[in-house]
Image (cartoon, coloured by chain):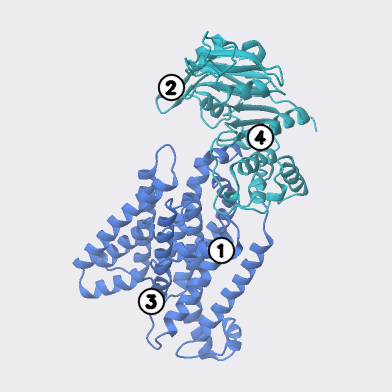
Amino acid sequence: MTRDHVELRGDRLRLAYDDRDVVADLTVDIPPGQITAIVGANACGKSTLLRGLARLLKPKAGAVHLDGHDIHRLPTKDVARRLGILPQQPIAPEGLTVADLVARGRAPHQGWFTQWSPTDEAVVVAALDATATLDLADRPVDDLSGGQRQRAWIAMALAQDTPLLLLDEPTTFLDLAHQVEVLDLLAELNTRDGRTVVLVLHDLNQACRYAHHLIAMRDGAIAARGRPADVVTAALVEGVFGLPVRVIDDPETGAPLVIPKARTGRTHGDTVAGNGHRARSL
Amino acid sequence: MRIHRRTLAVSATLLAVVGIATAVSVSVGDFAIPLRDVVPAVFGFGNPDSHFIVRALRLPRALTGALVGAAFGLSGAIFQSLARNPLASPDIIGITAGASAAAVAVIVWVGGSSTLVATGAFGGAALTATAIYLLAYRRGVTGYRLVLVGVGLAAVLHAVTSYLLTRADIFNAQRATVWLTGSLNGRSWDHVRPVAVALAVVIPVAMTLGRQLRLLELGDDTAKGLGVRVEPARAALIAAAVVLAAVATASAGPIAFVALVAPQIARRLVHTAGATLVPAAVVGAALVLLADLGARRAFAPTELPVGVVTGIIGAPYLLWLLARANRIGAGG
């Protein structure tokens, strides 16, 4: 199923917790039908921006527009049918099964009196299938491994069946294989359904590999945005993360690959290290 | 929401238990009425003596017990789910303590009718709940703050109750003590009516809010993302749970542990996670009815207050819960 694109835009956003401003004056457009990754150092405001875009945090100034309407003026259930958000550390009640969790994702599509419909059932099964959690359906969420649990939560977000999906660090706490598995799944959802995906990522290289559009943040402002190949340079990364790096082409995908520069005496053997040091072979 | 077949089956079975317990409760006593005569007597047929005993004395008592139990069970289920903590029930977080302090104050200072005492209890519960909510409020209300503030306030209110008792004359002190234990003794239709009306209003409200409750269990952010208006939904749920606990306490006193235990029994019976509102209400009703039967018959002809029996069942459960929470180290 190809879906209608939903437009999400943050307009002159000021986002704050209590009186502490995290994002000062930020305008951002989320390109529809693409994967957008938000990256930046810890505490740069990337999760705050995502929470703001997902209407979990009300801006002190400015507005988030969903299809041209102020998201805080739209009925929240209406928004929930267009925009799904997977927060960083979701909680499941003790003993809740995967099937029950995923079923709760259907809530925005149910009215006060409408019961569980065949459509609900079909969407939930499809979500379980897409995330390879069908076999886990009857297992309690708290019994699962980190990777399985994250897939179950993504299945819940998929069951919400929204054209726009926002995820806050979906790969944190997962080992490398599970990280790739989750990102591959999101990429597949994007290519297959044309779903717009926005995700906050820690790993810059994963962001470069999976995102069509990259938003690099620093101190609550956007430092750069655009195609990873266009914006990721050694200067940008050093500015954003405060780390000297080299940027080469990812031999697998051709996307930019960011490699931190080696500190003196920490190189092994045959390197072409850019910092001029050549260590003894081991 | 999906409704599990098992939930339906368990609820139906429990309802049958409640029905049977009601019938047995009406049938036994110093003047035994055979079970087969109970139903005719309820509708005014058969022997005029048994018909008076059933309709004026035993039926209102049994119905008050069932309704009060249902109200406590439902109230406990809502609180425990909202706070994500099996300890959060109106009898632990101070709401029934507020009702008790107010009721004892009325008994000791005013010495009024049981209606006045009930009104005082309701007012005390509502006031305490408001105080807990305001004290725990900080950009919304979270489970742990609610429990901690509630436990603290409960301690203060228990102290107030004790102080009032020491100042009371012996007759009032005795009356207050019986009230504090929770008793269904001498409950008439006047006691049935307010609980029935409150339940008739609040149960449908609580059931419709149950959907939001199940989403709130996934955390505020997820609930918001799924289209729940978190703060209004939570405030409405707390209000419903408070009204239930307040009305129940006003009618029968703070029957110990029912609100704490019933939701957990229900959860284990239906095998689902999270809030199970209907089963919790029915388990509450069954618990109070069965406990009252025990209280009446264990040392017959002496009748114990029902709160003694629920206390005997509930206290070990509370200890087990605390020990378990301690072992896990998280406490829910």
On whether disc 1 and disc 2 are found on a single subunit, the reply is no
Q: Which chain is blue?
A: B
| Contact, mark 1 vs mark 2 (Cβ under 8 Å) | no
Q: Residue at x 50, y 17 (%)?
A: A241
Vertical comparison of B190 with A153: above or below: below
Q: Quadrant of residue A111?
A: top right
Task: Name the spot of residue B161 as percent of width and height, x first.
Answer: 27, 62
Task: Name the spot of residue B304 as percent of width and height, x first.
Answer: 38, 80
Count up the numbered dots. 4
- Marks 3 and 1 sit apart, C-alpha to C-alpha, by 28 Å
Task: Name the spot of residue B295 as percent of width and height, x first.
Answer: 42, 80
Q: Quadrant of residue A170?
A: top right
Vertical comparison of B189 with A212: above or below: below
Q: Which residue is mark 2?
A: A21
Q: Which residue is mark 3?
A: B305
| Contact, mark 3 vs mark 2 (Cβ under 8 Å) | no
- Judging from the image, what secondary structure is the residue with disc 2 in? strand
- Judging from the image, what secondary structure is the residue with disc 4 in? helix
Q: Residue furthest right?
A: A1
Chain A pictured colour:
cyan
